[in-house]
Amino acid sequence: MLKTNIIPVLKKQFILFVFFFIIIFLELIKFDSNLIENYYSTFLYKYSSSVFLYIFGKLPFSVGDILYLLTPFIIYFNINKENTRRKNIKNLLCFLMLIYIIFQFQWGLNYHRTPLKDKLLIEHNYSTKSLINITDLFIRKTNNTQEELSKNDTLPVIFSDNNKAIYNASIKAIQALKKNKFINENAPLISLKNSLFSTPLSYMGFSGYINPFTLEAHINKNIPKIQIPTTILHEIAHQMGYSAENEANFIGIIASIESKDNLVNYSGNILALKYLLNELYKVDKLSYDLLYLKINKGVIKNIREARKEMDKFNNPLEPYFKNIFDYFLKANNQVNGIKSYNLVVNLLVNYYTSPK
């Protein structure tokens, strides 16, 4: 019978020893965010990722999703029934350690780079007054774009059925951010795929993800069209080395808002507005109620339609999947876990409050 060894030739004890010290090295350098920023994120990752993005970006299918499908079989065929339990445990341990090392070198170390707020000299806190002002600003921006698109403040914006056009407009938006103060590079290479797992993702409550091994950005095909631009831009921000969820949200929103395409612009404004309103509701319910009255009925209809579209995938298991992802984020230097997405409010309020 054909046998597949995960790591042939060398003895497992030696490999385990080497892997152990590589992991210790990785854990130690994570304490120095400047080291990660200067030598990994903006240097090593910048060039290594270009190779993967160029190669896999040319392919019309997701290599990463195929690897995920094959992983259980790889593990199964490497646990040999003829081996002792101890040997099988060593094989599995070697495999898991190798996966962890590849994950960190390939993308994961970006979780430990210098925070974007430090590079933008953004304050940790903001006043309720500033939150109210920026929320009001985004209500006006969202209303204006909605009226331009619908020609009537009571009608929802209708997105094209042509997903390719939406994808292309979104990609142009992120490419237009070249030489920005927080994206100090030329237009990034893009590797964007529709996920093979779109239906499971919908039931798990996720709109997209990046494969940290192939660096392909994946989009859930089932999400409402109004969410497609910001989801694409969020995942491409991850692809560019911004692992933190609030930073990927921020870059995605800024890219969409600065887009010359009104649909992409509208998508970004609505996402920003939702985060701002949610935060304002927590700290000043009265101001929330007053500002909510200013939102065009057409905007509210778009938000409700999108929510209704995703509600059909609601199921009792979704919170458990979210909890698993929460633990993953906390294990990767995001102490707020899944709540990290909401921290984009701090970046938005301070970014739009500070003088440009």
Image (cartoon, rainbow, N blue to C red):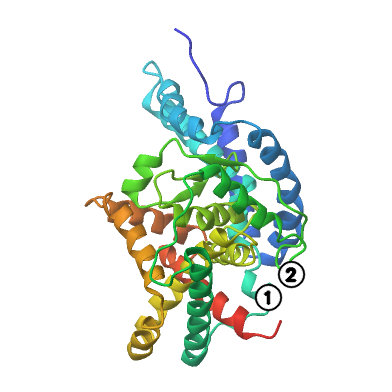
Look at the picture and state if 313 lies above or below 298: above
SS at circle 1: loop
Residue 44: assigned label: none
Look at the picture and state if 301 lies above or below 129: above
Residue 181: assigned label: 2
Front position in the image: 133 or 127: 133
Place of residue 157 in the rendered image (x, y in percent of width and height, measured from the top left)? 44, 61
Total marks placed: 2
Look at the picture and state if 69 lies above or below 219: above
Q: Is residue 48 left or right of residue 349?
A: right
Are the residues tagged 1 and 2 within 8 Å (C-beta)? yes
**Label 2 Cα neighbours within 10 Å, binned few <14 / some 14-19 / many ≥20:** few
**Label 1 Cα neighbours within 10 Å, binned few <14 / some 14-19 / many ≥20:** few
Look at label 2 and name its amino acid.
Answer: Lys
Which residue shows up at 53% across the image and 68% down it? Answer: 148
Place of residue 143 in the rendered image (x, y in percent of width and height, measured from the top left)? 48, 74
Look at the picture and state if 17 lies above or below 78: below
Q: Nearer the viewer, mark 1 or mark 2?
A: 2
Place of residue 26 in the rendered image (x, y in percent of width and height, measured from the top left)? 62, 52
SS at circle 2: loop
Place of residue 328 in the rendered image (x, y in percent of width and height, measured from the top left)? 44, 54
Read off the residue under disc 1.
Answer: 120
